Image (cartoon, rainbow, N blue to C red):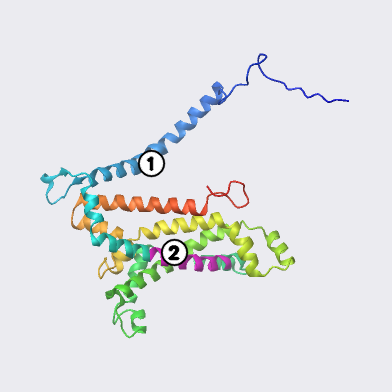
Amino acid sequence: MSTRTETVTVGAAGEAPPKGRAKLSEGARAERRFGWLLCAPAVIVMVAVTAYPIGYAVYLSLQRYNLAFPNLVKFVGLSNYGAVLSSPYWWHALEVTLLITVVSVAIELVLGMLLALLMHRTLFGRGTVRTAALIPYGIVTVAAAYSWQFAWTPSEGYLSALFNNSAPLTSQVQAIAVIIVAEIWKTTPFMALLLLAGLSLVPDDLLRAARVDGATPWQAFTRITLPLMKPAILVALLFRTLDSFRIFDNIFILTSGNNGTASVSTLGYDNLFNALNLGIGSAIAILIFICVAIIAVVFILGFGTAAPGSSAGKR
């Protein structure tokens, strides 16, 4: 007995099936137009508050524009970028920024993971523990920075008194260390909050099965918990790295960028608001924007955006 398979085609004989996107009905087109109308106000606001300022900053970065000499405005092309990139102040500020970013984010990841595990596994007083852990993040950065500044003020601050009335904010290395500690204290709860969301996605049944199979707690953490938390870790690291790279508040309050502690953001602030040099300041702002974009691309390409277990893998 033979089996015959019949293929049913649509349309005339020998005519290939239609390709491309299916034609939308009138109702579907009306629904799509209505969706765009609902999105239009948000799109307009986003363009107004982001696209226009960025475009205007690019325009200013191509001008020799100093508010002290408003009549001497002149188009200079990429000369401002050349002046910034050839200046030792930019490269020193970039080194300080990268040092603060790498050290603070690395420590925050470890401490944030420990804090997230504590909040996740707390059996009694879970709400109290989570609230207490998030208090530093709820404090305004400027207020927190002033508290750290006062704590290290000789003859007045309690931390300075513990170290024989030392003044670490007057030394480059010690001041950078204080800035890093202030960053870690302030933003570790934010890292822990993001990682806590990732921990809640790890199935408890999977961890119990690993214990039954004889896996140690460290093996279960490294081979089950961490791989499943990869998207949450990516988000936490990305957000904190971008935020730390743009550090301004703590440095501005603690040292004002003195003693070799200036970051790229404080360098841009000094040129824009102190020197009133809109051309150089805008060029620095655009360079910071480019650095932030590069960091985001590196993180996404390095970690991948697909969820664990999917066939997409890294993108």
157 to 249, vertically: above or below = below
* Most frequent secondary structure within the magenta stretch: helix
Sequence-wise first label, 2 or 1 = 1
Q: What's the residue at 31%, 41% (across, down)?
A: 52
Q: What's the residue at 48%, 28% (across, down)?
A: 33
Q: Is residue 261 left or right of residue 127?
A: left
The residue that disc 2 covers is: 105
Whole-percent x, y for residue 274 in the image: 19, 58
Q: Is residue 9 left or right of residue 308?
A: right
Question: Magenta span has 132?
Answer: no
Residue 118 visible somewhere in the drawing: yes
Q: Nearer the viewer, residue 216 or 165?
A: 216
Whole-percent x, y for residue 110 in the image: 51, 67
- Are the residues flagged by discs 2 and 1 in contact, CB closer than 8 Å? no
The residue that disc 1 covers is: 46
Q: What's the residue at 51%, 29% (across, down)?
A: 32
39 to 61, vertically: above or below = above
Q: Nearer the viewer, residue 158 or 98?
A: 98
Residue 272 visible somewhere in the drawing: no
